[in-house]
Image: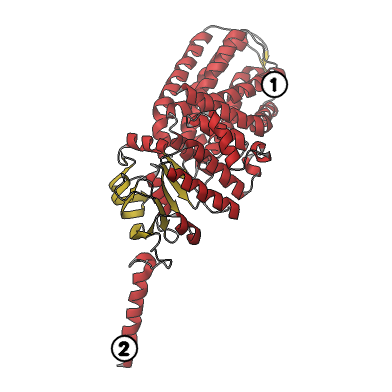
Amino acid sequence: MLHDAWIMARKDLRIEWVTRVATGQVLPFGALVLILFGLALNPDLVIVGEQRRSILAQVAPGLFWITVLLASLLALGRSFALEANDGNVDALKMAGLDPAGVFLGKAMAVAAQLLAIEVVLGFGAFVLYGTPLANFVMLVCAVILATVGVAAAGTLYAGIASGLRARDTLVPLLVLPILSPVLLAATLSTEAAVFGGSGGWSWVMLLGVFAVIYLGVGMLAFGLVMEET
Amino acid sequence: MADPAGRVVVDLDGVISLLGRFPALSGLNLSVRDSEIVLLRGPNGAGKTTLLRLCAGLAPLSGGTGRVLGYDLSVRKDRRRLRRESGLLSHQTFLYDELTVEENLKFWAQANRVELDTIEPVLDRLDLAGRLRNVSISALSTGQRRRASLAVMVCRRPKLWLLDEPHAGLDQAGRDFVDDIVRHAVRFGATVMLASHDLDRSIDLASRVVQLAGGQLVGSDSADSAVTEWAPAPGYLGTDLDADLDTDLDSGEASNAS
C-alpha cells in the first residue's frame, strides 16, 4: 500500500511540477480571494474589546480557511482530472494498485500542494490583515492537521464525483458540507494560535481526530469508489 | 498457432453486460483457447469493445457466466486478479499527457511491479528510445502515442492481450510492428483477442475470426475460411424492421391492386 501511495503521490507532484497548475492558477485564485475579502470588509473598522483590533484581523483566521477550502476545490478537481483523461482510472485498476494506496497517494499530493499554498496565503493574510501571532507551534499543528483532513475528505468525495458527468459542480456540493467541521475547528484553533487564549489545543486535537477519521474512511471506501468509477 | 486441445482461456456462456440500461452484450457465448489470436469483427456498436473490457475485468458481468484465465467474472476479487494478468490496448492511451514517454513507462512499470530494467529494451524495440523518450505524450502524434501505449503493455507481459483497433493511427511500419509484437507474444504463450476494422491485415494475423452483432456472437470460423463480407444478423439494427416494412409495402400494394 505504501509503495502504491508513494508512486501515486510522486507522479501527481511531478505532473504539478511540469504544469504548475497549483502555483499558476490555484495560488493566484487564493490570493485574489484574500484581497477581495480585504476590499469587502472595511479595514479601518475597529473592534473595541479587551484589545483594539481591526475587523479584518479579527476575522482573518476564518477568511484564511475559507480561502483554503475554495482553493482546495480547484486542486482536488485537477487531481482527478488527471485520472479521468485517457482512461487512466482503468489503467490504475488494470495495474492492480491497492485502492487505499491510490487514495493515500492522491491525498498526500493534494496535501503537499495545499500546504505550499497555505504558507504563501498565510503570509499574505498576516501582511494584508495585520494579524498577530501568539503561538507558532499551535498554528503549525493546526495547519498540518486541517490540511490532512481537507485533503483526505476532499480526495474521497472528489473520487466519488469523478465518474459523474456533473463532477465539476458536484465536488463543491459534496465536499464543502463534509468539511464544515474541519473549517470550524481549524478557524477556532487558528484564532487561539494567533490571538492567544485557552482551548486552542483541544481544537487542534479535534482536527487530528477528523484527519484520522477521514483518512480511515477514505482508505476503506476508495476501493468501492474506484470500482464504480 | 493455437492448440485445438489447449486450455480454455476465455469461457463465456450467455454473457450479458449492461452499460447503464443498454445491453452492450446480450447473451454472448464464446470460447477462446490458449495461444489463439481471435479477431472480433462487427459493425460499430456490435459489442467488440465491451467484450474486450469484460475480458479485462473492467466491464460488468450482468448475466450469464464467464471465466477468463480461470477467474470468475462474477467475483470481484477474481476480476481484480484478472486485471493484473490481462492487458488492454484501448481507444484511450492510458497515459498521462503531461509526462514524457519515459516517465510514463517508469510510472506504469512501478505501478505494475515490473522491473525498471525491462523498459530500455522495450523503448528500443518500439523505436521510442531516441528523441521521443523525453517528449511529453501531449506532443506526440496519434501513432506515436499508440506506440507508447503498446510499450506499457509490452512491459507488463500480460497473459491475455486485448487489443481494440491496434492498427488505428499507425503507419505501414507501425502496423507491421504491431503484428510482429502480437505474433511474438503468442509464441511466448499469450492469447490475443483483437477488434479491428482493418480486415485485410487482421485476418492475416488471426487464427480465428468471430463475428459479433447486436451484442451477440453470430459467427465463428477459422481465419482462412472467414468470409470477408459481413452479413447482418436477423434483428440487428432494424433488419427485421426493413423486412416488416417490405412486407407492409407489398401488402399495401397488393390491397391497392385489388
The image quarter containing residue B145 is top right
Looking at this view, is B211 or B189 the one in front? Answer: B189
Q: Is residue A100 above or below residue B60?
A: above
Does residue A176 show up? Answer: no
In the rendered image, which residue does mark 1 sit on? A124
Q: Residue at x 42, y 22 (%)?
A: A216
Q: Quadrant of residue B253?
A: bottom left
Q: Which of the labelled discs sits on residue B202, or is there none?
A: none
| Residue A217 left/right relative to A84 | left
How far is mark 2 from mark 1, CA to CA? 87 Å
Disc 1: host chain: A
In the picture, measured across the screen, residue A146 lies left or right of residue A47, that is left
Amino acid type of the residue tagged 1 in the rendering? Gly
Secondary structure beneath disc 1? helix
Across and down, in percent, residue A154 comes to: 50, 29
The colour scheme is secondary structure
Q: Residues within 10 Å of mark 2 (few under 14, many from 20)?
A: few
**B221 to A73, vertically: above or below:** below
**Quadrant that contains the C terminus of chain A:** top left
Above or below for A161 versus A139: below
Image quarter where the N terminus of chain A lies is top left
| Parent chain of label 2 | B
How far from the left and from the top, in percent, is residue A16? 62, 31
Which residue in the protein does label 2 denote? B254
Q: At which x and y percent is residue A70?
A: 58, 30
Give the structural element (helix, strand or loop) at label 2: helix
Give the vertical position of A162 relative to A51 (above or below). below
Residue located 63% across and 43% down the image: B138
Q: Nearer the viewer, residue A214 or A195?
A: A214
Mark 2 belongs to which amino acid? Ala
In the shown orientation, is residue A65 left or right of residue A179? right
